[in-house]
C-alpha cells in the first residue's frame, strides 16, 4: 500500500537544487522529444540554449524579451508569497500596453518632455486598474481569484483587438489592425547603439531589487511573508489581510502594466494585437523557477528569455515548430512542481495486514 506522508523537516538544500533538477529533467525530455521529431537532440539543444548567447545582437534581443518576463514575475512572486493566486499578469500587461498606447497616440508629434513619463504612467495605471477589479471581487465577495484573473486576461485581449480595429487603428495603415507608429518623444531611450536594448530593461532590474528590499528589509515585507505562510498567525498579530492583499495585487498590476507599455514604447513602437506571445503566463514559470524571490526571478527570466530566443532560432534553422517551446515551458513547470512536492512530501510503502 502506498501513501503520501509530509516530511517533518524539508531539505533546505533541495529547495535550492530543485530548479536545477527540473531544468535537467526538462532537457532530458527535450532530447527525447527532438529525437521523436527526427532532429539531432544535441544540435537542437545547442540552437535552443547556446546560440541565443553567441553574439552581442542575440544577447541584446534576449534582454529585450527578459524585460516583460521579469517585470511580471516580480509582481507575481509577491502575490504568491502572500497566497494571492494571481494568474492575470497577461491581461494586466495587455491593459498597460493599451492604456499607454492611447496616451502615446494622443501626444502625436508633440515634443513635450512629459510625453514619455505620462505614457509610462498611463500604462502603469491601466495595469493597476485591471488588477483592482478581481482583487475587489475576491475581498468583497470571496470570488475565486484564479478564475477572475484568467477571465480578465481574455477581456483585455479582445478589448485590445477592438481598439486596434477601431479607435486606435492607423487611418493610413491600409486597414491593418495596428496603431500608427509612436513619435520619438514617446519611445523609450535606446541604451546601446545598434541594438534594441532600451530603458525598460533597467526598470525591470530596478523593480526586482526594490521588491527584494521591500520583502526582505521592511516591516511591510515581513507582514507579506507571515501572511503567506500562516494567515491565522498574521491575523492574530494584527496584520490587515485586506491591506496586504491590495498591496501585492496592485503592485503586480503596476509592474505588469509597466511591462506592457515598455513593449509598445520599446521594441514594437506601436500597438499591435500580438503585443505579447504569452509573457504573462510564462512569468508564472519564472516566478516559481526563481523560488518566488525577486532576485531569483532575474536568473529565471534570463533562462526563459533564452528559451524564447532559441525557439525562434530553432524554427528558422531546424524547422522545429514554435509550439515545442510552449511544451518546454509546460514540462519545466510540471517538473518544478513535482520536485517541490517531493521536497515537502514522500511516498511511504506499507504492507497491509491480512485477516
Image (spheres, rainbow, N blue to C red):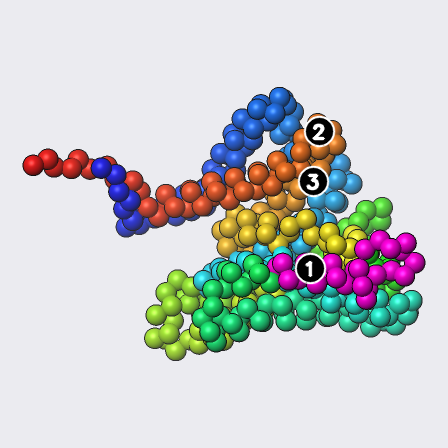
Question: Which structural element holds mark 3?
Answer: helix
Q: In which quarter of the image is the C terminus?
A: top left
Question: Which structural element holds mark 1?
Answer: helix
Q: Residue placed at 48% from the left, 42% from the top?
A: 334
- Upstream in sequence: badge 3 or badge 2: 3
> What range of the chain is rendered magenta?
153-177
The residue that mark 3 highlights is 309
- Viewer-nearest of labels 1 and 2? 1
Q: Which of 145 and 338 is in front in this view?
A: 145
State the image coordinates of residue 188 (x, y, percent, origin top left). Answer: 80, 59
Judge from the rendering whether residue 191 lies leftward or rightward of residue 210; answer left or right: right
User: Which disc is residue 319 wearing?
Assistant: 2
State the image coordinates of residue 73 (x, y, percent, origin top left). Answer: 58, 55
Observer able to see residue 255: no
Whether 107 is drawn above or below 304: the answer is below
Dot 3, how many residues are within 10 Å of its Cα: few (below 14), some (14-19), or many (20+)?
A: many
Question: Which structural element holds mark 2?
Answer: loop
Whether 53 is drawn above or below 319: the answer is below
Whether 66 is drawn above or below 355: the answer is below
Count of numbered tags: 3
- Upstream in sequence: badge 1 or badge 2: 1
The residue that mark 1 highlights is 158
Quarter of the image where one finds residue 210: bottom right
Dot 2, how many residues are within 10 Å of its Cα: few (below 14), some (14-19), or many (20+)?
A: few
Dot 1, how many residues are within 10 Å of its Cα: few (below 14), some (14-19), or many (20+)?
A: some
Q: Residue placed at 56% from the left, 59% from the top?
A: 150
Amino acid at each position: 500500500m502506498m501513501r503520501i506522508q509530509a516530511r517533518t523537516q524539508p531539505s533546505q538544500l533541495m529547495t535550492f537544487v530543485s530548479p536545477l533538477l527540473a531544468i535537467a529533467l526538462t532537457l532530458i525530455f527535450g532530447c527525447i522529444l527532438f529525437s521523436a521529431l527526427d532532429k539531432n537532440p544535441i544540435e537542437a539543444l545547442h540552437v535552443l540554449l547556446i546560440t541565443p548567447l553567441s553574439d552581442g545582437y542575440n544577447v541584446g534581443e534576449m534582454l529585450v524579451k527578459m524585460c516583460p518576463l521579469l517585470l511580471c514575475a516580480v509582481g507575481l512572486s509577491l502575490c504568491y508569497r502572500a497566497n494571492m493566486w494571481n494568474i492575470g499578469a497577461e491581461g494586466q500587461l495587455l491593459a498597460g500596453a493599451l492604456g499607454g498606447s492611447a496616451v502615446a497616440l494622443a501626444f502625436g508629434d508633440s515634443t513635450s518632455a512629459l510625453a514619455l513619463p505620462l505614457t509610462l504612467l498611463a500604462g502603469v495605471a491601466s495595469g493597476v486598474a485591471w488588477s483592482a477589479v478581481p482583487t475587489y471581487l475576491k475581498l468583497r465577495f470571496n470570488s475565486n481569484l484564479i478564475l477572475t484573473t484568467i477571465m480578465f486576461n481574455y477581456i483585455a485581449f479582445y478589448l485590445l483587438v477592438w481598439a486596434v480595429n477601431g479607435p486606435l487603428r492607423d487611418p493610413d495603415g491600409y486597414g491593418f489592425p495596428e496603431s500608427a507608429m509612436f513619435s520619438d518623444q514617446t519611445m523609450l531611450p535606446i541604451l546601446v547603439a545598434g541594438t534594441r536594448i532600451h530603458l525598460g530593461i533597467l526598470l525591470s532590474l530596478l523593480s526586482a531589487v526594490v521588491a527584494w528590499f521591500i520583502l526582505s528589509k521592511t516591516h511591510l515585507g515581513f507582514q507579506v511573508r507571515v501572511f503567506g505562510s500562516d494567515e491565522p498567525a498574521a491575523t492574530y498579530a494584527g496584520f490587515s489581510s485586506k491591506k496586504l492583499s491590495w498591496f501585492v495585487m496592485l503592485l503586480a498590476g503596476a509592474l505588469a502594466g509597466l511591462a506592457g507599455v515598455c513593449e509598445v514604447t520599446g521594441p514594437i513602437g506601436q500597438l499591435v494585437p500580438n503585443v505579447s506571445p504569452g509573457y504573462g503566463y510564462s512569468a508564472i514559470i519564472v516566478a516559481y523557477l526563481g523560488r518566488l524571490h525577486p532576485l531569483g526571478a532575474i536568473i529565471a527570466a534570463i533562462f526563459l528569455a533564452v528559451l524564447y530566443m532559441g525557439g525562434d532560432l530553432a524554427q528558422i534553422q531546424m524547422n522545429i515548430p514554435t509550439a515545442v517551446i510552449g511544451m518546454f515551458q509546460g514540462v519545466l513547470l510540471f517538473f518544478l512542481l513535482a520536485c517541490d512536492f517531493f521536497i515537502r512530501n514522500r511516498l511511504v510503502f506499507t504492507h497491509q495486514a491480512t485477516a
